[in-house]
């Protein structure tokens, strides 16, 4: 996975454009200093839901890193 430019930023993390296996992806990276028990629970729930959803109007779930402090979600077109 290759990180490219930062696309956006929020209170809990940053969004980067990147490449994974020659595919353009979005990489949502959570800020380690914002990690709390509630935030980890919400992150795990988001990953769980994204794994289940397959729809043309929803970004495609590629994968996630779920081991703190490196928490991220990778999505494609």
Image (spheres, rainbow, N blue to C red):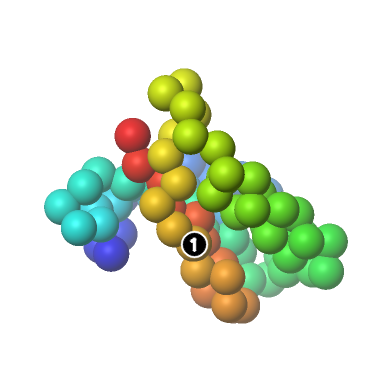
Q: Is residue 71 left or right of residue 44?
A: left
Residue 2: image location, x then y, percent: 25, 62
Residue 7 position (above or below residue 22) = above
Residue nearest the viewer, comparing 46 with 2: 46
Residue identified by numbered label 1: 64
- In this view, which residue lies farthest toward the right? 38
Q: Quadrant of residue 35?
A: bottom right
Q: Is residue 7 among what the camera can see?
A: no
Residue 22: image location, x then y, percent: 15, 52
Question: Which residue corresponds to the image point at 33% horizontal and 34% vertical from the top-left?
Answer: 77
Q: Total marks drawn?
A: 1
- The image quadrant where one finds the N terminus is bottom left
Q: Is residue 68 among what the camera can see?
A: yes
Residue 3 position (above or below residue 11) = below
Residue 45: image location, x then y, percent: 71, 53
Q: State the SS at label 1.
A: strand
Q: Residues within 10 Å of mark 1 (few under 14, many from 20)?
A: some
């Amino acid at each position: 996975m290759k990180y490219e430019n930062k696309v956006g930023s929020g209170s809990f993390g940053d969004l980067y454009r990147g490449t994974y296996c020659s595919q353009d992806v979005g990489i949502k990276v959570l800020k380690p200093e914002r990690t709390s028990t509630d935030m980890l629970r919400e992150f795990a729930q988001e990953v769980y839901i994204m794994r289940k959803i397959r729809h043309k109007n929803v970004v495609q779930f590629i994968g996630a890193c779920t081991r703190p402090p490196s928490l991220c979600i990778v999505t494609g077109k």
